[in-house]
Image (cartoon, coloured by chain):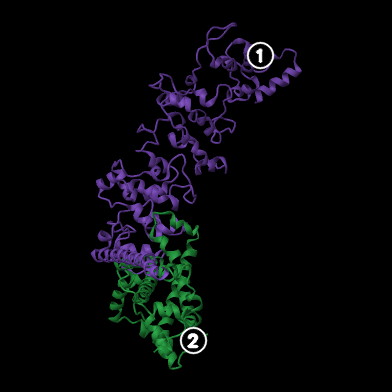
Amino acid sequence: MAEWELREADLDRIVVTRLSLVERVQHIVLMVSFTILIVTGIPLLFPDTPLVHVFGGAFPVRTFLHRFAGSTLALLAAFHVLYVLFSQDGRRDFGWIAPRTQDVRDFMHYVRYQLGKTDEPPPFGKFNPFEKIEYFAVVWGSAVMVATGFMMWFFEATLRVFPKWVYDLILLVHGYEALLAFLSIILWHLYNVHLKPGAFPISRVWIDGKVTLRHLKEHHPREYRSWLRRHRAGLTGDET
Amino acid sequence: MRGLDLEKRMMRWFAVPLFTGSVLGATALRAQDSCTACHGDRAMAASLASDSALAALLFVDPAAYRASVHGQLGFTCTLCHQGISDYPHGPVVPVDCAACHTQAGQELAQSVHGRPHPATGANPATCADCHTGHQIFRSSDPRSTVNRLTQFEGCARCHSDAERMRRFGQEDTATVQSYLTSVHGRGLLEKGLTIAPVCTDCHGERGTGAHEILPTSDSASPMSRARVVDTCARCHGGIKAAYDQSVHGAMFAGGNPDVPTCIECHTEHAVQPVASAASSVYPTHIAQTCTACHDREDLNDRYGLPTERRRTYLGSFHGIALEAGQLTVANCESCHGSHRILPSTDTASSVHPANLQTTCGSCHPGIGAGVAEGRVHIASVREDINLFAYGVQWLYYLLIAGIVLFAVSMISLDQYRHWVVDPRRRRPSHG
């Protein structure tokens, strides 16, 4: 094993791909459409506040933007399903991101590590338990928002099938799910990727998709070890 | 006109014009001349009294009088100012217009203007206050102070004089002025539409009502609550026919004191066209106007009406879009109607469940029948949607609270590691 220990400098020199170009594009489309949806949607949840005046009288523009961004999100979701089903990277990563019981043990390890009870970092793979939850939250949230959103858009048809109370329920779900997503992104996602010590002020992974071996070793030890094994077998092509 | 012209011509031709011409005209001129010797000379009139206001009253412009309807008829001064035969004359008797204008005199005596006011003991207005003393014209003459085009100014002279009105127990003088910017006032004064209503059209009886004006608190006044609908219907007859069929109109006919008449929704002096942004029933104002009654707890209790109409509307997509400036969205009137408004329990109502699909469909073609199966104004998820939706709402409350708590605790844990644990681990190696 010792012969495969890299030199300290190599940890910072060698970078590996965390997000492929197709994945980064998906992320940017998601980020932009999500932001538009939040800005054009969240104010409607607070009708008693001056928030609704942010549209400056251009309410139909708001409606158009919201539906445009929503449709974009729906198309992105469809593309992502195909990506997960048919692309090599997609299939591989989906296999890694699927939850397993190891995640519970990893989480307990993480809490002990954070409290200083152990010095050994939790042995996360490419996706830690939080990232897994977040991914499936996005999957669930998008499905709910796209489904309820289209039912709201085409409410004339919705009301041909359902009674009004179902429509009211759809409205309620769309609103609270939006709030949930908004808070998760603001509090959880932005902290974990950008604001936390080590990443602050901004992580560039969403732009270049690259992380250093050191990052891999510290934050994704299981992936790091897997990289070393593949490197040993001459299978890695990520070195620069 | 002819009589005087004739005399003028004769004055030119004959040396002694006072003895020629018609007998009446000649006498008039002679008498006039002796009165105008003093009262027709501004300086002389001013010397007759030390008080300048009184002096001004003592001056009568002979030319202006001759142009007036009475002057044209050749009426002498003493026809009105009776009891004067000589110079110097004694105290004058007040002019009694009613001696000739019997009907107007009787009507005025019954009106708020012609009865001694309880607070002051004085009559609020005399004939001359509206018609002037010496420059009276027929009301059809545009030079008249009571002509349709000039009347407002005459009424407003007293009615926007705060000090004068206070003496008669009326504080508000702004309301009268708001007529000027109303659809009626602008129609008359800006557009020159003489059919637009003037003060006396609404406050007086139809036709000859200018003299019988009564306070609106008097049930005999055309603007009293009991009569205002009929008064507006003098011009807006078709609206009254619709109003009579409405829940408001039917209850009004039964003497109900709470339902709105025309003016509760449209206001009176300040009434605006419904298409004007200043109108009380314009999309941006109508919710406020309707809920001035429909959000009143006492009224909702008394009539068993649903509460929180304004909040539930403003919280709906329609209300939010309206608040954000999209005026085409539905407001109260779009669904409930206006003059013919009926309760949702009435099968003829536009918001009766059986008619809801049609009503909503007028803006949203092809809307499903499901729209009738549920409430439109949602005040409470539990009451107005159902228990299941209430459960879902609570699930989201818990989820959102859970997410926030989890995020905050994980972030705290991360900060703890960074600020407390990591420095402690590093210290030995640095030491």
Q: In the rendered image, which quarter contains the N terminus of chain A?
A: bottom left
Query: Where residue A45 sits: x, y (%)?
Result: 38, 60
- Please state the chain letter of the residue tagged with numbered disc 1 in the rendered image: B
Q: How many marks on residues?
A: 2
Q: Quadrant of residue A122?
A: bottom left
Q: Position of residue B341 (x, y in %)?
A: 35, 53
Q: Which residue is mark 1?
A: B43
Same chain check for tags 1 and 2? no
Residue at image mark 2: A238
- Out of B47 and B3, give the one closest to the viewer: B47
The residue closer to the viewer here, B322 or A184, is: A184
Rendered residue at 53%/13% (across/down): B82
Report the amino acid beneath label 1: Ala
Tag 1 near tag 2, CB within 8 Å: no
Q: Which is closer to the viewer, label 1 or label 2?
A: 2
Q: Chain of mark 2?
A: A
Figure chain in purple: B
Tell me which amino acid carries mark 2.
Asp
The CA distance from mark 1 to mark 2 is 114 Å
Mark 2 residue element: loop
Q: Residues within 10 Å of mark 2 (few under 14, many from 20)?
A: few
Q: Position of residue B133 (x, y in %)?
A: 55, 21
Residue visible at 75% across and 15% down?
Answer: B14
Chain A drawing hue:
green
Q: Nearer the viewer, residue B423 or B202?
A: B423
Judge whether residue B336 can be spotted in this image.
no
Q: Is residue A35 visible?
A: yes
Assess disc 1: are there few (<14), some (14-19) or many (≥20) residues with their C-alpha within 10 Å of its C-alpha: few
The mark found on residue B150 in the picture is: none
B109 lies above or below B302: above
Q: Nearer the viewer, residue B190 or B399?
A: B399
Residue A104: image x %, image y %? 28, 77
